[in-house]
Image: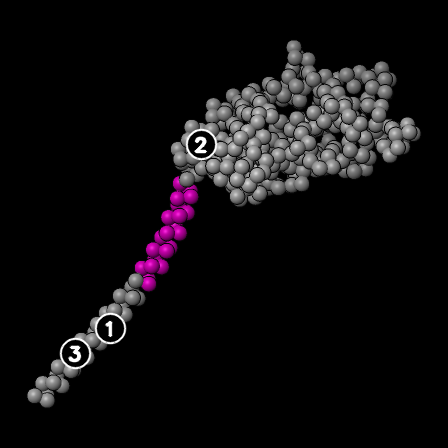
Amino acid sequence: MENSQKLVLIVTLSFSFVILIVLGMICVYRRKGSKKDESWDKEASFEHKEKSVQEMEINGDLVRFDGGEDLTCVDILDAPGEVIGKSSYGTLYRANLVRNDSVVCLRFLRPTCTEKVQDLMHVVQLLGSIRHPNLVPICGFYSGTRGEKLLVHPFYGRGNLAQFIKDGKDECHKWTIISRISMGIARGLDYLHTGLQKPIVHGNLKSKNILLGQNHQPFVSDFGLHALLNPSATQEMLEQAAIEGYKAPELIKMEDMNELTDIYNLGLILLELLTGKEPVNNKANPDQDSYLATSLRNAILDHRISDLYHPDILLDENNGDGSLIINEDRVLGFFRLAMACCSPSPSLRPNIKQICMKLEGI
């Protein structure tokens, strides 16, 4: 009997020991399995993100960049908006984000004017990564279910440079402000042309696309926007630029634009600042040189020096007593630089580095 009890005890202990071993093995396998599942989940998550980029036109999605981390689709789609600009390829809205009581600019791109979002994402990611003190940042990009696309930008309450010049207030004729705006635009363009791994051509540089912040700090907007549009829309952009006087004479097709066509437009902006006049072209001959640049060349030939700049530029900026504190040679140096940028021959135009150096020396 005693031997029988010992046998039962031995069997029970052995059985318990086997159960413990089995349980331990199960725990080990579960841990390994959980790690495998976790790894799979990470891969699945990444795959889902990649897939969402490919299917944005179907599902609708929002890509956020620096400064737009708190944006949501609801913020953008439900924001009360006011139209502040229109073009053949889209509409610009001043939008109030209700949730955080802030104001942004929403640029709506018409579905018929853009490529499929799958073909645009590498451009969107590149443009959204660009940050410079004189460039308007992209904070977010939304693509909707019907192919509509929205770019989210900060809002600048001072408006654009074209309106600033057109208003003709005393500020726009002050040499210090003209210098500050010119230098800021040039630095922003310098970053696009030389500060990245591959140069970015603005493609639609004009005074309407220069926004003004505090102390008249300029912000270049819409750089590279042409890369998001289809060929017919970019050609319409070029035709509109020709009507407004912002088309380099050698530029026939948008795909032929380069850094030197940007330089031509920069020269026109400098002339706008200097003269207070618009570069409106002859609509009957949009392929000719800019009307403003041509008229100023004629003024040089006729020795009408006073037509080359606004006379108020030479007035004392401190007390307005009419004394001349700005040397006319500096103003004429600025004018010669602007005209060099507007040379009908692209090979004679300075590059952006040379322009920045000249502006700093004037």
Q: Which mark is residue 144?
A: 2
The answer to whether residue 357 is magenta is: no
Instruction: Examine the rendered structure and indicate whether residue 58 appears above or below residue 233.
Output: below
How far apart in space, not on screen, are marks 1 and 2 (Cα)? 57 Å
Taking the view exactly as shown, the residue that stands out farthest to the left is 1
Please, what is the three-letter code of the amino acid marked with disc 1? Leu
Residue 196 placed where, x, y %? 61, 41
Counting residues from the N terminus, which is met first, the one under dot 1 or under dot 3?
3
Q: Judge from the rendering whether residue 141 lies leftward or rightward of residue 1; answer left or right.
A: right
> Circle 3 — which element?
helix
Please, what is the three-letter code of the amino acid marked with disc 2? Gly
Magenta residues span 31-51
Residue 44 placed where, x, y %? 37, 48
Q: Are marks 2 and 3 in contact (CB under 8 Å)?
A: no
> Circle 1 — which element?
helix
Q: Which mark is residue 20?
A: 1
Asked if one can make out residue 262 in the rendered structure from this viewpoint, the answer is: no
Task: Mark 2: give few (<14), some (14-19) or many (20+) Cα within 10 Å.
Answer: some
Label 3 belongs to which residue? 12
Counting residues from the N terminus, which is met first, the one under dot 2 or under dot 3?
3
Q: Residue at x 72, y 16 (%)?
A: 291
Q: Residue at x 77, y 31 (%)?
A: 178
Please, what is the three-letter code of the amino acid marked with disc 3? Thr
